[in-house]
Image (tube, grey):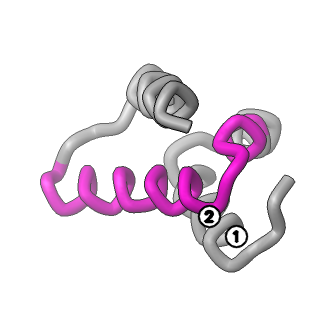
């Protein structure tokens, strides 16, 4: 798992959404790169600004898009 400021910030944001350490660590592991971690973090921030709920499916789809983009 990448240990960076962005990773730590994303972990905090994800734990607010899901109280499951294995899920949080899994998302970060699947993100693979610092750029993807930042993108997921920005996605969460934008959803808060738009007052939209994030589901596990949303994160899964985003990870799939990011993986295909890499």
Residue nearest the viewer, comparing 40 with 45: 40
Q: How many marks?
A: 2
Query: Tag 2: Cα neighbours inside 10 Å, few (<14), some, or many (≥20)?
Result: some
CA gap, disc 1 and disc 2: 6 Å
Q: Which residues are magenta?
A: 26-51
> Residue 45 colored magenta?
yes
Q: Which residue ends up furthest to the bottom in the rendered image?
A: 5
Is the magenta region chiefly helix, strand or loop?
helix
**Residue 31 image point, x, y percent:** 65, 43
Q: Which residue ends up furthest to the front in the rendered image?
A: 70
User: Dot 2: what SS?
Assistant: helix
Query: Tag 1: Cα neighbours inside 10 Å, few (<14), some, or many (≥20)?
Result: some
* Snapshot quadrant of residue 16: bottom right
Determine whether, in the image, residue 40 is placed left or right of residue 3.
left
The residue labelled by disc 1 is 8
The residue labelled by disc 2 is 12
């Amino acid at each position: 798992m990448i240990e960076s400021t962005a990773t730590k910030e994303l972990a905090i944001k994800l734990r607010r959404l899901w109280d499951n350490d294995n899920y949080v660590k899994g998302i970060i592991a699947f993100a693979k790169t610092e750029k993807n971690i930042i993108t997921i973090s920005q996605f969460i921030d934008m959803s808060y600004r738009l007052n939209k709920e994030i589901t596990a499916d949303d994160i899964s789809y985003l990870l799939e898009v990011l993986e295909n983009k890499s």
